[in-house]
Amino acid sequence: MNKLSLICACTAIFAALTSAPAAIAGPRDGGSLRFANAARQMDHSFDRGQLHQRTTVLPGENRSRDRQQHREQRSDRREEHADQRRDRREDRQEQRWDHYWYHSTYAHPYYAPGYTVVVLPNDSTVVVVDGVRYHYHHGIYYRAHGSRFVVVNAPLGAQVAVLPVGHYGVHHGHVHYRVYAGSYYLWEPQLSSYRVVSAPIGVIVPVLPEGAEKLSVNGQRRFRVGGVLYEPLFDGVRVVFRSVAVG
């Protein structure tokens, strides 16, 4: 073998040796790539399985959830219906109270305390209580104020021979009272007259005079007449009024 052939042979051997790692590594790198792809596919499948497991709801769970929703809806409807019934009941009470305000049984004109007149009724009479002069006419008491006369509450201790048409009787305990325009009277047989007395606490009356003042006490409806505070009650048939405070 000449020198040139020897050089060519060495060059070929060197080239084969230097290319062998790449040839050997090539299949190994391809296998690694295929392995990596397979691993990614497995991870993706695993993630999809986890997602499916998380989002899948068993039929029993669906029924339980539906029952809970139905219970909540029924509870909401019951509360709504209860509110509606309560509103209707309050409206009916308001209507009964309003019905009272527009219906008076007084046979003579009624004037609430504070009302002022220039001329007294012709047939008024004079009533003196503790040295104070009042003018009385059909259950209404007047007191002079300058050149006018002002309607006032019935003075305690005032005595009149006859009560006007429209008065009514109420029992409280063992006492029988006569009531007119929010004032309470007791019959005095030795004097043959009716005497103005304080309203008893707890007495129940069927009506209040037109001048009753509407109030709200701690969110509750109240009425005030001549210093007496009343609460409205429903006795099963109609609205009545019970005295709760005096003064």
Image (cartoon, rainbow, N blue to C red):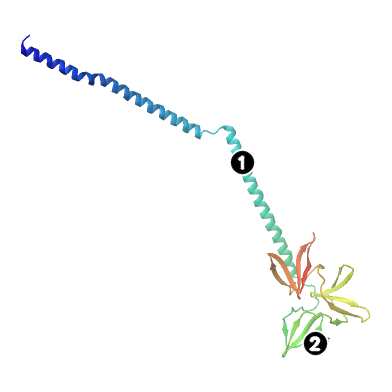
Q: Residue at x 67, y 55 (%)?
A: 84
Task: State which quarter of the image contains the N terminus.
Answer: top left
Q: Residues within 10 Å of mark 1 (few under 14, many from 20)?
A: few
Regarding residue 150, the answer to whether it shows in the image is: yes
Which image quadrant is residue 232 in?
Answer: bottom right
Task: State which quarter of the image contains the C terminus.
Answer: bottom right
How far from the left and from the top, in percent, is residue 201? 81, 69
1 and 2 marks in contact (CB < 8 Å): no
Q: Residue at x 65, y 51 (%)?
A: 79
Q: Which residue is mark 1?
A: 68
Where 40 falls versus 76 (above or below)? above
Where 145 falls versus 210 (above or below)? below
- Asked which secondary structure carries label 1, the reply is helix
- Asked which secondary structure carries label 2, the reply is strand
Q: Which residue is mark 2?
A: 132
Q: As drawn, is 217 to the left or to the right of 6?
A: right
Q: Residue at x 33, y 23 (%)?
A: 34
The amino acid sitting under disc 1 is Gln
How far from the left and from the top, in percent, is residue 222? 72, 68
How far from the left and from the top, in percent, is residue 23? 23, 19
Q: CA distance from mark 1 to mark 2?
A: 75 Å
Q: Residues within 10 Å of mark 2 (few under 14, many from 20)?
A: few
